[in-house]
Amino acid sequence: MKNLSKSGFIRGLQCMKSLYLHYYNPELRDETSESQKHLFDTGHNVGFLAQQLFPGGIDASNGERGNYGEAISRTLSLIQDIQEVIYEAAFSYRGSLCYLDILVLEEGGWVAYEVKSSTEVKDYHIMDAAFQYYVITGSGLPIKKIFLVHVNNQYVRKGNLDLNEFFTIVPLTDEVLALQPEIPVRLKAMQSMLEAGKEPEIQIGPYCAKPFACDFMSHCWCEVPEYSVFDISGLGVKAFDLYEKGIVEVKDVPDDFPLSVNQRMQVIAEQRGETFRNDEELSAFMAKLVYPLYFLDFETIMPAVPLYDNCRPYQQITFQYSLDKKSAPGTDGSTEHFEFLGTPPANPRPDLIRTLVDQLGTNGSIITWNVSFERSRLNELANDFPEFRTKIEAITERLVDLMVPFRKKHWYKPEMKGSYSIKKVLPALESELSYGNLEIQEGGAASLIYESLYTDPDPESILKKRADLLTYCGLDTMSMVKILEKL
């Protein structure tokens, strides 16, 4: 019998093939991305904070979660010694293994607390807790109640972190008890599959990405080309209808398959190699622009634990902007460049908003890519810094979304591959600029680099990271300048 951990059980619920590969072909697993590593780190940090809600505990894992045997033995000893708070308590029952984040003896009975870094209870959290309850009670320890501890995203930091406000504790006992008959049935199916030692014949499907992006997708999706029907803009799960009929290339989508006008345009562009332009719409868009033009791009971090006063968990904190100013139309018009980059550990937002308000002046269109992002950040700044509210509100009224002509396919080239991301539009229109050679190539990486500045002790490393951040953000605004020139 294979030992099945909680994470393995949740993996098997999502896809039995993924569970098989996890045990028999782990070498096929995709490399863990930096963003995934950051999520894991966030989870560990939030879990450690939650322990402080129940002080005085002992870590049964001794910081080594991979050694189940010793952790289970240590947990048993702590329970026998009436240790009232146990962190990372480990249990085993009929080949199933689990760690519990926090086990507490309350009023003569044991209470289980599972900690998640999310801001709400999700369906798989309940199944996760049900598995833990099954294993713990099966091992012989009665559980009186079980709770989920998650982050409260309505908490606003004022001074020292208030953990009682930062966390929300949700009772799950009733939901978990209702699922108990289902757990052994699910486990038996998983164990039978693993003991058979044969890879399940499971086709790719929406479950490849829900509730998690599977780390064997490169293996299972290896026959799907880099550009496929799954890249048809807005098609979503309907792409699987095509895939199940053996259609994976965009150019092979039949004429009678139901598509929107823009989706059909994308298919025709691929089939014929055609570029589509709606000059009337493009001219109407251009006519709305008022010079001087300002090209603005923000970068943000979203720390689970608010770093500054008046900030909430996972609030987007704007730490950087790039700003290009173009005074006159045409490719020969002069462009001025401005930039701001915060300096950890100081709160970047007060200086950022003062500088930005001054540099944007009071007239001229402010061009962004996906205006909802910049507008949301500006609205947050107006709320958090009311002394600038009037000026910020005036700024938001000047915002223009350069993405719109491409999202609506008023100009579409096959090279855009169904996307209106600036990373796809730029090379399709302007081959001289590219993100490919940059150290930082997308916003998520920029966020991680900036967060690393809070703990980086090396001055040279800090200087290098800051230079890379300025280069990346600067290319975002210069890309908009060049794309508008093409328009």
Image (cartoon, grey):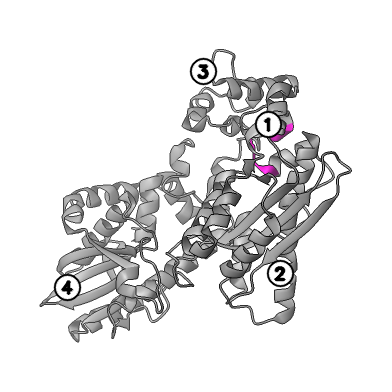
Q: Helix, strand, or loop for circle 4?
A: strand
Question: Is residue 418 visible in the rendered structure shown here?
Answer: no
Pointer 1 residue = 285
User: What is the C-alpha distance between the residues marked 2 and 3?
Assistant: 48 Å
The earlier-in-sequence mark between 4 and 1 is 4
Pointer 2 residue = 466
User: What is the C-alpha distance between the residues marked 3 and 4?
Assistant: 57 Å
Measured as percent of width and height from the top left, residue 369 is found at 64, 44
Q: Amino acid at mark 3?
A: Pro
x 58%, y 58%: residue = 33
Depth check, mark 3 against mark 1: the one in front is 1
383 up-or-down from 465: above or below? above
Measured as percent of width and height from the top left, residue 56 is found at 28, 86
Pointer 3 residue = 258
364, 59: nearer the viewer: 364
Q: Helix, strand, or loop for circle 1?
A: helix
Depth check, mark 2 against mark 3: the one in front is 2
